[in-house]
Image (cartoon, rainbow, N blue to C red):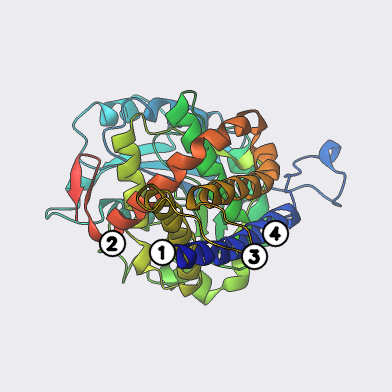
């Protein structure tokens, strides 16, 4: 039994290591993008971008009084011409001051609509309905979605618009970063960077569909061509990846990743472990809903490998035995330590160029300490995402 566990773990690690190294190479191959807005900027292009794209930024919000003001202010401060973009905040039955804060922004291009005016019966996917309603009222031909707890640099919107004008994508996945200062926040920052590196690599090489709803852009035309969220509108999560795959199925060459430091959106970390697990369980809950079966293979490999890394030390405690391997008799615990160390090295090798892009190399030394927590949360969140329930925005989702 012990030999089977170890051999299986070794085989899975080999596959995992190859995958992570491949992701690293793909990430490094993604061309960096910088928008050129005037003649003095021009170095690698013959002419600068002339902005004409009308953009609608959609922000679903529920009880976000702590963050919505900063989010809207960072959008108001954008360098993109204000006559070319609008912001639609869709309030999802907030019980705090979210609506009044949005209304306090006396801007012609910012408006707030109330989901309760359009929804009379309970839903399982309030966020999708909010986005759908906003798009129906939008004036932009490019829809940009973000979250109410996000902030962005002043060139965020013009970078997205420039990338769209240059490459004509139907769907843009753009980078997201978590800025945390305590252990939980730093843990989330490292975890998010890993996911973002994989996202960029996967989208660039068309390996599988992956993105984050905190920083997306897609053509309104493309949204309606795939009938929006039809067919996925009863799934609580998935307003990002499930929609992305629908558009990918129709126009695979026009689904792109925007690798630009000016396009990074910063989001808030969960402030406690309970909320963190609820968030990750929510993400995991859509795993078996993916029509993109390529990502299911990756998720299965990652999950089973981490599950075995959890089983090995438990087995070693109750079966404190060595086994013979080419004349060497290592214990299960020693083998587990070796696998965890190798996993950490491979992942750090992958993370280094990603952390450099996000300006987060200074937190990489936390990564080895975070490894045991990452293994544990991957197993728990994956299991509960499939078989459990979770609470999100004060609602229970089964």
Per the image, the residue denoted by label 4 is: 26
Q: Nearer the viewer, residue 214 or 180?
A: 180
Q: Nearer the viewer, residue 351 or 398?
A: 351
Give the label, 4 or 1, closer to the camera: 4
Where does the image place residue 337, in percent across and percent down from the top left?
54, 46
Residue at (28% x, 30% y) in the render:
98
Does residue 184 appear to the left or right of 19 in the view shown?
left
Give the label, 1 or 3, closer to the camera: 3
Measured Cα–Cα span from mark 1 to mark 3: 48 Å
Task: Tell me, for residue 235, which label it has, or none.
Answer: 2
Quarter placement of the C terminus? bottom left
Q: Nearer the viewer, residue 300 or 316?
A: 316
Query: Are dots 2 and 1 in contact, CB under 8 Å?
Result: yes
| Helix, strand or loop at mark 3 | loop
| Helix, strand or loop at mark 1 | helix
Which circle's residue, 4 or 3, is located before the other in the chain? Answer: 4
Per the image, the residue denoted by label 1 is: 242
Per the image, the residue denoted by label 3 is: 326
Where does the image place residue 251, in percent across and percent down from the top left?
56, 73
Task: Using a 10 Å C-alpha cutoff, classify the residue at mark 2 as few (fewer than 14 neighbours), some (14 to 19) or many (20 or more).
Answer: some
Measured Cα–Cα span from mark 4 to mark 1: 23 Å
Measured Cα–Cα span from mark 2 to mark 4: 31 Å
| Helix, strand or loop at mark 2 | loop
Residue at (74% x, 49% y) in the render:
32
Q: Quadrant of residue 173?
A: bottom right
Which circle's residue, 2 or 4, is located before the other in the chain? Answer: 4
Where does the image place residue 160, in percent across and percent down from the top left?
61, 48
| Helix, strand or loop at mark 4 | helix
Measured Cα–Cα span from mark 2 to mark 3: 51 Å
């Amino acid at each position: 039994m012990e030999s089977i566990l170890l051999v299986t773990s070794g085989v899975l690690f080999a596959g995992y290591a190859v995958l992570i190294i491949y992701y690293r190479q793909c990430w490094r191959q993604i061309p960096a993008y910088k928008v050129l807005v005037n003649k003095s900027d021009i170095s690698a292009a013959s002419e600068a971008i002339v902005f004409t794209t009308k953009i609608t930024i959609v922000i679903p919000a529920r009880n976000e009084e702590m963050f919505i003001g900063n989010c809207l202010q960072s959008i108001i401060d954008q360098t993109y011409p204000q006559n070319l973009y609008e912001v639609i905040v869709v309030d999802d039955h907030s019980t705090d001051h979210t609506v009044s804060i949005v209304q306090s922004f006396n801007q012609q291009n910012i408006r707030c609509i109330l989901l309760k005016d359009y929804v009379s019966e309970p839903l399982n996917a309030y966020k999708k309905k909010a986005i759908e309603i906003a798009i129906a009222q939008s004036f932009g031909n490019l829809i940009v979605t973000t979250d109410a707890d996000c902030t962005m640099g002043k060139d965020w919107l013009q970078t997205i618009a420039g990338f769209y004008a240059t490459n004509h994508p139907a769907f843009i996945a753009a980078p997201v970063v978590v800025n945390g200062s305590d252990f939980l926040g730093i843990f989330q920052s490292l975890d998010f960077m890993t996911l973002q590196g994989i996202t960029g690599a996967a989208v660039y090489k068309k390996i599988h569909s992956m993105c984050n709803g905190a920083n997306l852009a897609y053509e309104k035309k493309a949204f309606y061509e795939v009938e929006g969220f039809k067919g996925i509108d009863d799934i609580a999560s998935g307003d990002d990846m499930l929609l992305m795959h629908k558009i990918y199925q129709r126009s695979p060459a026009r689904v792109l990743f925007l690798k630009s430091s000016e396009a990074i959106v910063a989001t808030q970390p969960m402030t406690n472990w309970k909320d963190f697990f609820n968030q990750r369980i929510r993400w995991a809950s859509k795993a078996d809903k993916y029509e993109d079966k390529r990502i299911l293979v990756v998720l299965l490999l990652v999950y089973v490998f981490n599950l075995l890394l959890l089983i090995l030390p438990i087995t070693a405690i109750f079966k404190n035995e060595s086994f013979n391997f080419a004349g060497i008799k290592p214990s299960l615990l020693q083998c587990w330590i070796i696998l965890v160390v190798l996993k950490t090295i491979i992942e750090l090798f992958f993370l280094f160029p990603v952390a450099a892009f996000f300006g987060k190399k200074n937190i990489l030394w936390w990564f080895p300490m975070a490894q045991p927590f990452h293994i544990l949360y991957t197993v728990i969140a994956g299991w509960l995402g499939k078989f459990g329930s979770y609470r999100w925005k004060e609602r229970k989702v089964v």
